Amino acid sequence: MRASGLTVFIAFFILSCGNRNTVGVGQKVDTGESSVTACRFTIETTGDINTVRILNPWQDTESTELVYYLLPRKMMLPDSLRERTVIRVPVERVVCMSTTHLAMLGALDATGTVVGISGTDLVYDPEIRSLIDSGVIPDVGYENNLDKELIVSLNPDLLIAYGVSPASAEYLRKLSEMGVTVMFDADYLEEHPLARCEWLKVFGLLTGKMEIADSIIGAVSRSYTELADSLKRMVTGRPRVLLGAPWEDVWYVPPSNSFAARLIEDAGGSYLFADLVTPNAVPFSMESVFSRATEAGVWLNPGSAISLGDIRQADYRLAQLPVFESGRVWNNNARVQRSGGNDYWESGVVHPDIILRDMASLLHPELFPGYSPVYYRILQ
Amino acid sequence: MAGRANISVALTFLILGLLLALLFVLDILIGSTRLEASDVFRSLFGQGTAHGEIIVMQFRLPKAVTAVIAGAAMSVSGLLMQTLFRNPLAGPDVLGVSSGAGLGVALMILTLSPVFEFSSLNPLHGWSLIIAACAGAGAVMVIIMAVSARVRDIMTVLIIGILLASAISSVVSLLQYFSNESMLKTYVIWTMGNLGNLSPVQVRVLLAASSTGLIMAFMQVKPLNALLMGETFSRSVGVNMKRTRIALFASASILAGSVTAFCGPLAFIGIAVPHITRLLFSTSDHKVLVPGVILTGATVVLLSDIVSALPGGGHIIPVNTVTSLIGIPVVLWIIAGKNMMGRKI
């Protein structure tokens, strides 16, 4: 790949991000050989005040830092924080812009705080779905199409957003001006599955359930690390793994430092594009991905396909790949609601250990006799 | 003099034909993956490696053939519109075909995506987008033809066409405003144009539709030449204006509509290629221009496709950006050069 100077620079920044934050107040998770640290937030505790810093909450930024001061409800507001973003905790009324936020709150048994959701169609959780269907939790719209009046009338303590670009911050600016406290969450930008799960800490602080958060993170990372370590010992051959699907003639290939590629390596597979290191997915031509994909032994996450026929219909040439003919094609949409909500992107964020076990069982079925995957389905 | 002009026209045809053949071979040789030239040629004749044959016969050959058809069809469509409207800025866009097709696709993506969770692979792809684009383009074509049958002045038809295209663009913007990221991505990638995603059956359908449009264009060569002298003159030499208009609209719409449906809206080709061709052949005779535009259009799109694979390392640039970025400076350069010599286009 001919990487431009800028790409190299951004890649360097992303890779160096881990080091930089261990120097700060790193929330280390001991994973045996190496320690994983969520890259995009730090927590600093001074007395009753927790300061949460969100670093680079969107893509292609390198010096954005958002600071939130979490204060107990009854505490007097110190003068020094008058001009700052203060969140009174525990929060009681939350508007969530992403389904991962719902999963985090759900894991902490704080679903009851949710008063509004962006994109209710994408919600999987049956409990929340029934609240949506009965009209208790409204859809607040999305992006530049937010129903700002509705949000204000919900009187939330906090709106948890995620940023794709600085523009995301811009469309929420008006809400802040209208008195809604907005916090950006960057869990989706974390490259390590455990680092994503670690964002539970932020939600633990927000809901006053830090102990539950810590115990979940501890259990999940132990289970993840033990499985990854034992796979490392037991696995003899690593199947080559093809990831994703094309959009028309373009195939956006996730780099080897992405979340999905990391899971493949930990699950005892070998990612086809292990040599590709960039911050974002890179557009490749179908022809070149096809050439490489002939080596693949397993194909994971082919878009939203639910059958091999979907793939054949999208591009007949894909059906000639040896991996397609062997039938080892799996997609992460085993748990999907009729309106489109996929639990992989919801509860999956707090269960990276289950996702890892699923993937390992697909790559090495001989090691998991009788196991049936939770999030994955085989395409037929 | 006439003899010398004929020789120069024949020579231009010969050179263009050779260039087209050369670029066609180059387009198959150069791809985003490395394949030895010998392997490419062996694959063409069924003697290559299994991998080479798939790459050449299912990726590169259909793409090159699509490039030739798309270039020829869009360019002829543009030529017909420029002559009919006697306006150098007219092109297939004037018909609202591109925007109509875009509306069809946008409606499809927005209305059906909640059912299928629209992203890269789903049942909506393949024929469904093509059918949506055809329906959109066809609906706009019918409106324009209905208007053209009632309005006598061709300039009014032109204005109505442009207004209709703007109105449709606004509806598409509105749809985009209400759609989410993955829908937007699907739509935006469609608008970037794509020559390489057609199955052999789709290439055949595109070829059949375009051939129909091209044959209809050849049948209108005489009325087209008469139109250059104005509608009044045309009527005086016995051209049935109503029938000619409908025939030209139908042919241009079939050409642009089928290409847009299969390859997305290919920018610039329809407007620019007729100008390049007129300059190359120094004539306005449609007997020369129609075949000339076919050759030039195919050549330009093939060249764009080759350039789009040049970044190497498996990456490609959307062909639509290449046609505009490379084509527009070329046309500006030609126009500037000719104008300095005191000639108008």
Image: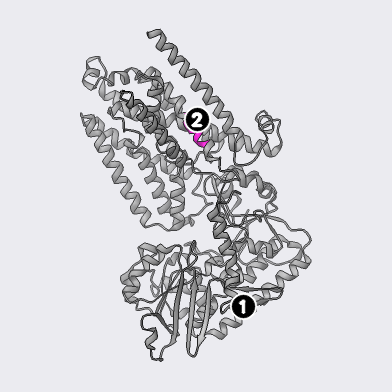
Q: Mark 1 against mark 2, which lies toward the viewer?
A: 1
The vertical placement of A219 against B67, above or below, is below
Secondary structure state at the residue bearing disc 1: strand
Main SS category, magenta section: helix
Secondary structure state at the residue bearing disc 2: helix
At 40% from the left edge and 81% from the top edge, which residue is drawn?
Answer: A86
> Which residues make up the magenta segment?
B298-305
The Cα atoms of the two marked residues, 1 and 2, are separated by 59 Å
Residue position marked by numbered label 1 in the rendering? A28
**Chain ID for label 2?**
B
Q: In front: B283, or B220?
A: B283
The vertical placement of A378 against B140, above or below, is below
Q: In front: A68, or A366?
A: A68
User: How many numbered dots are placed on residues in this image?
Assistant: 2
Residue type beneath disc 1: Lys
* Residue B138 located within the stretch drawn in magenta: no
At 58% from the left edge and 31% from the top edge, which residue is drawn?
Answer: B26
Q: Residue B232: x percent and y percent?
A: 21, 20
Residue B314 image-quadrant placement? top right
Q: Residue A194: x percent and y percent?
A: 61, 72
Regarding residue A61, the answer to whether it shows in the image is yes
The vertical placement of B303 against B193, above or below, is above
At 28% from the left edge and 21% from the top edge, which residue is drawn?
Answer: B228
At 50% from the left edge and 77% from the top edge, which residue is drawn?
Answer: A105
Residue position marked by numbered label 2 in the rendering? B68
Contact (CB < 8 A) between labels 1 and 2?
Answer: no
Q: Residue B153: x percent and y percent?
A: 21, 29
**Chain ID for label 1?**
A
Relative horizontal placement of residue A70, taking residue A26 as reference (left or right)? left
Q: Residue A73: x percent and y percent?
A: 41, 88
Relative horizontal placement of residue B128, taking residue B138 as reference (left or right)? right
Residue B342 image-quadrant placement? top left
